[in-house]
Image (tube, rainbow, N blue to C red):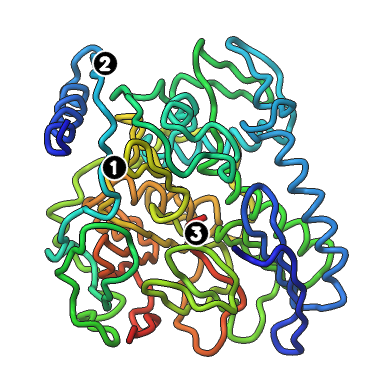
């Protein structure tokens, strides 16, 4: 099954559920969860984001291009460039239904919108790092 | 492969140790070098308890003993499940602990190092997972519907980092950083200039130059988490799968972002947001901006986007 057909199948199944149909009918599809790296060029302007730099590198697969020039932070209006626009970022307001259980641990935080706790903003750092943060 | 264990001491940075546990790289840093041995013992003990309660890969773990219906669980497992349900609520179900069966069906049904990197084609069913709203937790009383397998893999490490960092700081009276596979929690007074962290695609030793774009930042409190589709990947029939499932399909999320890092008031919240961002795809930057959570997103081409106060000048230029 081609990747495109599989993706169509997935989208239809998701759309059906989101339209409120009773239950998603099971749709069996061959796993062609193709190329993790082939998400396509995302060179569009993302709402609320500042485009820092880029480097096309590592990731397996389909020599995607569209990499941007690199070097340093190109980001327009750093930090608070998050003004508005948000045309994409559709709803999905994570308002959370209040109530209940466990707080997540180290309690040195204040609450941000959506119920997430927030800490002080990170700053840029120079020199050696003590630890790394990536996928694992 | 990270070195199995290492300890270093630096007058300015404190002392650190690293080893492997919970199937991942553990990094511990304390501002008082004299506190390191006791801090490490406490962390090792904490992680052993978490593993015994939460690992779905251990036949003798508490989570594997859960059945459908109502049951009492240990305080530790109740806390872990509570954190997972909180993540589900905050992310509108993007981070859902009921993905256990879907994760197994996708081939991730044992410790990751035992998962065959390549295998024959799989046939998967596009089907929404049972859903976190079906799970009831009231104190230590847990009710599971039939057929639901909990998987706390998306939240347990981050919560465990929060928990242990707070416990070690309280015991040692110094600044502490705990990293479990790149899910980082800090507690106590930070070192001058903050905790220095290199953010990259895949967690690794700090003294090894990473592949791909990376940033150097410092945090002073709370937590930082990174979710990535470049880690924990395997292939079936030539197709690449990864461990971040979209609960609405039960399949690996579309890889719009290969790596997302978020800073928040706790590692658990940072991790919930970073994981949800991978699943939300193109909607993620707007969502993170509205939440006010400083974030860095790397797309499939390696282009980097930052929102909500993530320092733009933290990116290290690549040659």
Does dot 2 land on a helix, a strand or a loop? loop
Asked if B242 appears above or below A67 in the picture, the reply is above
Disc 2: host chain: A
Asked if B205 appears above or below B276 in the picture, the reply is below
Does dot 3 land on a helix, a strand or a loop? strand
Disc 3 crowd, CA 10 A, few/some/many (<14, 14-19, 20+): many
Residue A100, position as x, y percentages in the image? 54, 32
Nearer to me, B21 or A44: B21
Q: Which residue is rendered at x = 66% and y = 35% of the image?
A: B54
- Residue marked by disc 2: A26
| Circle on res. B248 | none
- Residue marked by disc 3: B225
Disc 2 crowd, CA 10 A, few/some/many (<14, 14-19, 20+): few
Residue B149 visible? The answer is yes
* Sequence-earlier tag: 2 or 1: 2
Q: Which residue is rendered at x = 85% and y = 58% of the image?
A: B41
């Amino acid at each position: 099954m081609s990747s495109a057909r599989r993706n169509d199948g997935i989208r239809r199944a998701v759309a059906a559920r989101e339209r409120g149909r009773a239950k998603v009918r099971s749709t069996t599809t061959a796993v062609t969860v193709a190329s993790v790296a082939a998400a396509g060029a995302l060179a569009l302007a993302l709402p609320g984001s500042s485009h820092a730099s880029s480097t096309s590198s590592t990731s397996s697969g389909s020599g995607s291009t569209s990499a941007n020039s690199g070097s340093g932070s190109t980001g327009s209006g750093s930090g608070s460039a998050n003004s508005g626009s948000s045309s994409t970022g559709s709803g999905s307001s994570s308002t959370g239904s209040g109530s209940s259980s466990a707080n997540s641990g180290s309690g040195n935080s204040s609450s941000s919108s959506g119920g997430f706790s927030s800490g002080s903003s990170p700053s840029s750092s120079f020199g050696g790092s003590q630890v790394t943060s990536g996928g694992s | 492969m990270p070195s199995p264990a290492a300890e270093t001491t630096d007058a300015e940075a404190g002392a650190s140790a690293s080893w492997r546990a919970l199937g991942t790289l553990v990094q511990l840093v304390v501002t008082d070098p004299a506190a390191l041995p006791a801090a490490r013992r406490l962390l090792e003990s904490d992680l052993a308890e978490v593993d015994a309660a939460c690992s779905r890969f251990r036949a003798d773990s508490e989570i594997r003993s859960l059945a459908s219906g109502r049951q009492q669980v240990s305080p530790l497992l109740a806390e872990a499940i509570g954190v997972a349900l909180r993540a589900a609520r905050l992310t509108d179900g993007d981070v859902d602990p009921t993905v256990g069966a879907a994760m197994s069906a996708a081939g991730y049904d044992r410790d990751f190092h035992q998962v065959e990197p390549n295998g024959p084609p799989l046939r998967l069913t596009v089907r929404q997972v049972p859903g976190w709203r079906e799970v009831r937790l009231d104190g230590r009383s847990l009710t599971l519907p039939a057929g639901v397998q909990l998987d706390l893999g998306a939240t347990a490490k981050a919560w465990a980092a929060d928990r242990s960092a707070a416990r070690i700081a309280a015991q040692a009276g110094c600044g502490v950083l705990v990293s479990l596979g790149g899910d980082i929690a800090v507690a106590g007074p930070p070192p001058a200039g903050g905790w220095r962290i290199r953010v990259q695609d895949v967690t690794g030793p700090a003294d090894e130059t990473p592949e791909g774009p990376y940033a150097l930042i410092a945090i002073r409190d709370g937590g930082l988490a990174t979710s990535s589709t470049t880690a924990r990947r395997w292939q079936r029939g030539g197709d690449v799968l990864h461990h971040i499932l979209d609960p609405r399909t039960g399949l690996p999320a579309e890889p719009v972002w290969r790596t997302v890092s978020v800073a928040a008031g706790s590692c658990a919240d940072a991790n919930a947001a970073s994981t949800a961002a991978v699943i939300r795809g193109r909607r993620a930057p707007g969502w993170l901006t509205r939440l006010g959570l400083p974030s860095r997103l790397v797309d499939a081409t390696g282009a980097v986007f930052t929102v909500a106060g993530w320092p733009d000048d933290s990116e290290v230029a690549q040659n």
